[in-house]
Image (tube, grey):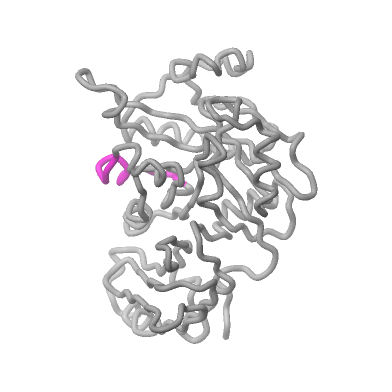
């Protein structure tokens, strides 16, 4: 029986990483709304640095402003400087649109230009953020308890490797593509996302802008499946992973029927099938771009009936268009496939 892995129905285009004039961006929150709506977006997460400001006045029947912030955990080497500083940058998306205080706020990270905008309630928070997996995991746990979805941002720009992210716990999303990092020559990949999946962790792929100016915009997004453009409905869809991430290709259908995965999409040159092990394939275009493919995963499913499950089984897909731009699906478990 056919089962849709990507939900059927209404999809909303979302930018989940954006900086405004509230912190170090060049566009006001209102200008951001206008610019993104003109490009067909319905959702923007305002992730200004080190400050959590709701922009509910911007939300209406055609646009949703997500309350969010980006917080840093910096390692300052004694003999180094800005170009060499390893850092964790995490986005915190609030499930409560009215949230204006986060308990892991550290005044020592706040830009001088942002300081006058900090509320008295936020100033009352006393928290010290330090670099390190243990410290970051503690902060993620606290934020999740307060109703935040937490994403891990631009690992390449952050100068991080597996030793920095491999033991992170409680993440909701991982940036596979960050448009600003791409523009400055520090391109991200889906390797951190895959590494965490292979460990058995439930994380979702993200493509974002991390825009600070108009020229940074419209490069990476997620397409969210939701019944309506309402804060709780959208955040619930994001939390459950009812979306795909893209810097170019569109996915119109992703379904499975008797072990055959069917994909319909905008024209692409390759479609990669990956798992937690070496069951994989790469379907390439010949004379014409691919817009519809069927991928037989029955050998993988048959293998999983008797194989050791020391790694949590999953399948996922990556689509690559003729410009090299990619789209990423989330990982699907055996329970979802059978």
Residue sitting at 31 percent across and 80 percent down? 303
In percent of width and height, residue 322 lies at: 42, 68
- Residue 319 in sight in this render: no
Residue drawn 73% across and 52% down? 229
- The quadrant in which residue 1 appears is bottom right
Q: Tell me what residue is drawn at x 33 percent, y 76 percent.
A: 281
Left or right for 18, reference 259: right
The residue furthest right is 61
- Taking the view exactly as shown, the residue that stands out farthest to the left is 79
Above-or-below relation of 130 to 216:
above
Residue 164 is a magenta residue: yes
* Number of marks in picture: 0
Q: Main secondary structure of the magenta part?
A: loop
Q: Check if residue 21 falls in the magenta segment.
A: no
Whether residue 336 sits left or right of residue 134 in the image: it is right
Picture coordinates of residue 137, whole percent (x, y)? 39, 36
- Residue shown at 33% from the left, 33% from the top: 134
Q: What is the span of residues highlighted in magenta in the rendered image?
A: 160-171
Measured from the top left, where is residue 47 in percent x and y? Answer: 56, 35
Can you see residue 151?
Answer: yes
Pick the residue in front: 153 or 278: 153
Say if 315 sits above or below 298 in the image: above
Viewer-closest of 238 and 116: 116
């Amino acid at each position: 029986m056919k089962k849709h892995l990507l939900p059927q129905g209404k999809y909303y285009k979302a930018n989940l990483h954006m900086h405004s004039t509230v912190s170090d961006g060049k566009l006001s929150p209102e200008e951001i709304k206008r610019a993104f709506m003109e490009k067909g977006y319905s959702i923007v997460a305002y992730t200004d640095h080190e400050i959590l400001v709701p922009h509910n006045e911007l939300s209406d029947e055609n646009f949703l402003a997500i309350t969010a912030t980006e917080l840093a955990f910096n390692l300052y080497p004694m003999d180094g400087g800005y170009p060499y500083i390893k850092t964790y940058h995490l986005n915190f998306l609030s499930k409560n649109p009215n949230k204006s205080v986060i308990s892991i706020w550290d005044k020592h990270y706040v830009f001088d230009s942002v300081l006058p905008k900090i509320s008295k309630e936020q100033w009352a928070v006393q928290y010290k953020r330090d670099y390190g997996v243990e410290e970051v995991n503690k902060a993620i746990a606290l934020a999740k308890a307060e109703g935040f979805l937490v994403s891990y941002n631009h690992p390449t720009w952050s100068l991080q490797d597996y030793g920095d992210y491999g033991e992170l716990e409680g993440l909701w999303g991982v940036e596979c593509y960050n448009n600003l990092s791409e523009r400055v020559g520090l391109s991200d990949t889906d390797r951190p996302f895959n590494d965490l999946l292979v460990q058995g962790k439930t994380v979702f792929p993200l493509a974002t802008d991390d825009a600070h100016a108009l020229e940074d915009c419209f490069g990476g997004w997620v397409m969210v499946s939701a019944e309506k453009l309402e804060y709780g409905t959208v955040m619930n869809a994001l939390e459950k992973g009812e979306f795909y991430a893209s810097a170019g290709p569109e996915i119109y259908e992703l379904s499975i029927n008797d072990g055959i995965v069917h994909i319909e999409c905008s024209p692409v040159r390759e479609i990669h099938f990956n798992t937690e092990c070496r069951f994989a394939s790469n379907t390439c275009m010949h004379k014409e771009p691919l817009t519809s493919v069927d991928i037989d995963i029955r050998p993988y499913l048959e293998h999983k009936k008797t194989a050791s499950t020391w790694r949590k089984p999953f399948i996922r897909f990556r689509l690559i268009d003729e410009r090299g731009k990619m789209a990423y699906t989330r990982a699907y478990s055996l329970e979802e496939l059978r």
